[in-house]
Image (cartoon, rainbow, N blue to C red):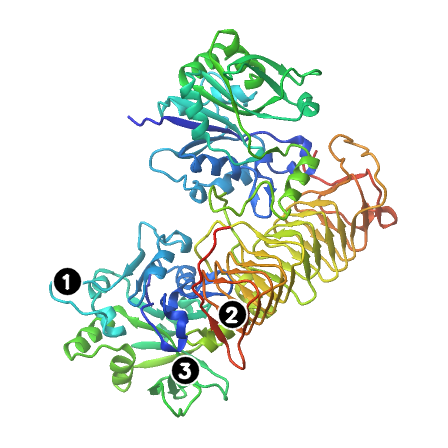
Amino acid sequence: MVRKEMIAMLLAGGQGSRLGVLTAGVAKPAVAFGGKYRIIDFPLSNCINSGIDTVGVLTQYQPLRLNTHIGIGIPWDLDRNNGGVTILPPYEKSASSEWYTGTANAIFQNMNYMESYHPKYVLILSGDHIYKMDYEVMLGFHKENHADVTIATMPVPPEEAGRFGIVIADEDKKIRAFEEKPAEPRSNLASMGIYIFSWDALKEALCHLKDQSGCDFGKHVIPYCHETGRNLYAYEFNGYWKDVGTLGSYWEANMELVDLIPEFNLYEEYWKIYTKSDIIEPQYFSPEAVVEKSIVGEGAEISGRIYHSVIGPGVIIGAGTVVRDSIIMKDTVTGRGCDISRAIIAENCRIGNNVALGVGEEAQNRLHADIYAFGLATVGEDSVIPDGVSVGKNTAISGVTSGDDYPDGMLPGGEVIIKAGDAV
Amino acid sequence: MKAIGIILAGGNNSRMQELSQKRAIAAMPVGGSYRSIDFALSNMSNSHIQTVAVLTQYSARSLNEHLSSSKWWDFGRKQGGLFVFNPTVTADNSWWYRGTADAMYQNISFLKRRHEPYVIITSGDCVYKLDYNRVLDYHIGKKADITVVVRDMEPDADVSRFGVVSMNEDARITEFEEKPMVSRSHTISTGIYIVRRRQLIEMLERSAAEDRWDFVTDILIRYKNMKQIYGYKMKEYWNNIATVESYYRTNMDFLSPEVRRYFFREEPKICSKVDDLPPAKYNAGSDVRNSLIASGCIINGKVENSVLFKKVFVGRNCVIKNSVILNDVYIGDNTHIENCIVESRDTLKANTYYCGDGSIRIVCENNERYVL
């Protein structure tokens, strides 16, 4: 009988709609991050670095990129005879067929997968955070306290506590109460959405709540465990942890990597982050190139000037183009003489010559003021921007655009162009 | 599958000076991200040759480390795979490989057990892309016993370190001189051969019986009038890196857009071991022009007309010019490096000056690395 002490279930099915056009065609965990990675690389690398070699990845929304990225798990050493990585999409059953309706519902629907490994503990992860964490230390804490459920938490500044699920624990870290986005928080320990369950507690809760619609860990499973008198403990994590759920926080987390000594350091020998590398060539800077305070991925060809930016692998920046405070992802090509400032340009875009991105005054976005904010110009995957246009702040562009889409050669601040596809 | 591959990677060469002290030439880093042997291995894999033997001998640790997994080149299949043959002591043999033919002869059971009709032999110290199937079609069309891939060199090039061939109008090789002082032709052998597997076994066994151990002098040159040996002219990029000068030039070639396009952007691509390094990082004060930078580098100074391999750290106010810095080198602040090749894993102290005058200087300091 195959027996694993702890297996991980990684929730990667969410759209991440607050990332706007960036997640029009890919699930949020597959969005590029930090010049060569994808968001899901962080929890996957944490797993293997923590000695967890059995990971179920639950997918639902736009899984193609995620599936091709993960494959059989070779980059993370998760190609195993016993265990390894398994992609778990929703599937049809003889009596019913339903999508994953909530985080806990998704886990419940994969009860067979988990049971096949006879785990003692199950680690629940989500695929949308940037952090390095040793889950084995958390498991040690869980065992030491004879906990049924351990919730990873981190201290947040009191003024920000209202944005999180807050955990109230006593000195022994035993959890007394929860508050979801409280107006007046009684504690500063925010839940990170990372849980360790003892198998009995998880199975019992999931089976009991199986008819709960949209069954969710934060909303249903954890409160249920609390009410039924399970031992819930708060594990305090004090490292770097960043939710990259909004364009603003996504941009900020990328930009933090270019600091002289970044708080989140990718250059340490210890605790490497692994990813699938399709491009291995070195990067080239032409005689007229300038690069400062930036990170640049493999195979990029830079003829322009790059300041304080994150440039992905295979990107080509034409001569005379200036890139500032921007994120440009894999295989995007920009023409000559562009001026790109505070922009997020997704993978495989074609930007013409003399294009200005992120110019003018800030204006509130016409369609989604909550998504396209922070003064950023956002360009979705595979987009094309014609020569000579200028694009304002808080804008979004997705799809193949032509000169006709830009009256007077201009997309004013706060405007959106979305062509074809099931974009947001 | 019509052919199997053999890569000769055992060689050392005094013309590499200090650079070959700790590794075989086939393990030399090339073009920022690769090792020399990646080119031969990728050519094999891209030509759908699934069974490849690498014969190593001299200082093979670094090479073996690089070949520790065959997955990077897409070998490691159920049919075929990547075989690494180091010399071993057996009941009836306690010799090292006494030459290229002996290296193959000592592993003749590998040749005998396969069923593919042809063998492609190449060396691990050349930088090129070639579809061996094109050469194989030529070989079959010519009904050749052996086909040698040859290349015309510039009229003023020094060919004295190569095998030099002359061919008749039918491309049959009429003259073959190994490393001639004065050569009669500027067509050289690239060290890539195609031969029928049974023919090779027969020739190797016969040479061994006569105590002859070198593939070029004891097989190619001896058999040239008896067997049909043809030349296949290759016109694409090809360079042998086995001298300091040519090693430096080959790396610098990658600064030209044509060479980069040919190797980095055009299919098929060259594969190499993946090192899981973060993207290169450029801090305030970095100034990088006409240079190749590999992943994992951290740049704080000035880099011009240079090739930096993986994980190089360049301190503040450094100037690096016309140089090749091999992987994992730490360069302290205010250091000036010009016309140099800096050996891998080296640590250069702050405020030092290295300059090659008229020729390429090899820097090999062996300083202790202070853990940062």
Q: Which amino acid type is shown beneath numbered disc 3? A: Ile
Q: Looking at the rendered structure, which numbered label has been put on residue B251?
A: 2
Quarter of the N terminus of chain B within the rendering: bottom left
Residue B42 is left or right of residue A336, and the answer is left
At which x and y percent is residue A132?
A: 52, 36
Q: Is residue B104 left or right of residue A291?
A: left
Q: Is residue B333 above or below residue A103?
A: below
Q: Earlier in the sequence, mark 1 or mark 2?
A: 1
- Left or right of residue A396: residue A16: left
Q: Nearer the viewer, mark 3 or mark 2?
A: 2
* Chain identity of mark 3: B
Gap in Å between the C-alphas at discs 1 and 2?
40 Å
Q: For the residues labelled 1 and 2, say whether their Cβ atoms are less than 8 Å apart.
A: no
Image point (45%, 69%), residue name? B127
Give how far across and how far down residue A213 sits, in percent: 57, 14
Which residue corresponds to the image point at 27% horizontal and 87% vertical from the top-left?
A: B225
Could you tell me how far apart the alpha carbons at marks 1 and 3 are, in whole angstroms? 37 Å
Pointer 1: what residue? B90
SS category of the residue bearing label 3: strand
Nearer the observer, disc 1 or disc 3? 1
Residue A224 vertical placement versus B145 (above, below): above
The percent coordinates of residue A246 (x first, y second) are 68, 33
Pointers 3 and 2 in contact (C-beta within 8 Å)? no
| Chain of the residue where label 2 is placed in the rendered structure | B
Q: Secondary structure at mark 2?
A: helix
Chain of the residue under label 1:
B
Name which residue lies at 72% across and 62% down.
Answer: A319
